[in-house]
Amino acid sequence: GLPRVSQRTLPLRADYNYPNQAGEGVDVYVIDTGININHIDFEGRAKWGVTTVPGAPNTDDNGHGTFVAGVIGSRTFGVAKKVSLIAVKGLNREGTSTLSQILAALDWVIKQNAQSSNHKNVVNLSLGAGYSKVLNSAVDTLVQSGMFIVAAAGNGNDHNIGQNACNYSPASTPTAFTVGSTNINDQMSSFSNYGQCVNIYAPGERVRSTWIGPTNREIFTDSGTSFSAPNVAGIAALIMSAERGDRSDGSWSPKNVGNRILQLGTRNVVKNFKGPANTNLLAFNGAG
């Protein structure tokens, strides 16, 4: 999936093109199962932030978060290859959580943002549940504080058949940037949620990325909107690292970053598409 976000048309070339800044100077908070920060492909750019799951270790004991982080910013599989990654463990080893644990993770991130001198920040939420006004409100609070939030659209119902993303959270948060999934042929994934709450689509089938294991070199292949979203989190980091403005002039505002991603998106190439026509957009990093 990685080369697809750096070229407009098929067939795919083998290479991935990206700007020289490659996300340098941008912090991406990965609220997930944690990150294997010692994986060689992170080159020391991943660090542990916090664990909000009671009794859980400060490691990724599931793999999902390490995979997501790899799509965002690992050396081999990442969209933004110089980005800094921060592990925020809000999901347990089964990949599940409670609302209070996710809210605690979001609260920690907003406090970190307020204390940090670096305000080029992205938050990736490759997680979801049924519609929750409370969760959506908490996500919106982060956006209002100036952070760009990327959310997975969700993987449909119990039979993995895509549903209306507006029925899920945080995908339905109006101020979040929600991402659905496509396959290698630009077909909308059958499991991908869709609808007016989805902003854009990105590759999410048979994605390769970093994984957990004893050698810190493990890789894995998986599918889901969880792995579409980090493509867009990486693109947001690319945009922020290339932008010369500052926070005060709005250059990195969530609205401006989101608008830039929409402007870059390749229009009307997603096949078997469901949803409003203006949401038929495939993510593009602008460097192809």
Image (cartoon, rainbow, N blue to C red):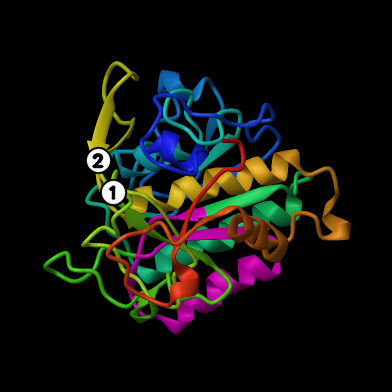
Judge from the rendering whether residue 14 lies leftward or rightward of residue 18; answer left or right: left
From which residue to which does the magenta span run? 124-153
Q: Quadrant of residue 198?
A: bottom left
Residue 58 vertical placement versus 40 (above, below):
below
Where residue 147 sits: x, y (%)? 66, 59
- Depth order, front residue of 34/17: 17
Dots 1, 2 in contact, CB < 8 A: yes
**Was residue 146 drawn as part of the magenta stretch in this picture?**
yes
> On residue 183, which mark appears?
1
Say what amino acid the circle numbered 1 marks: Asn
Q: Residue at x 43, y 63 (%)?
A: 102
- SS category of the residue bearing label 2: loop
Residue 114: % across, % down: 73, 56
Residue 31 highlighted magenta (yes or no): no
Q: In which quarter of the view is residue 176 placed?
A: bottom right
157 sits to left or right of 82: left
Instruction: Name the side, left or right, on which 238 lies relative to 98.
Output: right
- Along the line of sight, the residue nearer the viewer: 277 or 211: 277
Residues 277 and 2: in front is 277
As drawn, which residue projects farthest toward the left?
159
Looking at the rendered structure, which numbered label has been put on residue 206?
2
Residue type, label 2: Arg
Label 2 Cα crowd, 10 Å radius (few <14 / some 14-19 / many 20+): some
Residue shown at 69% from the left, 53% from the top: 113
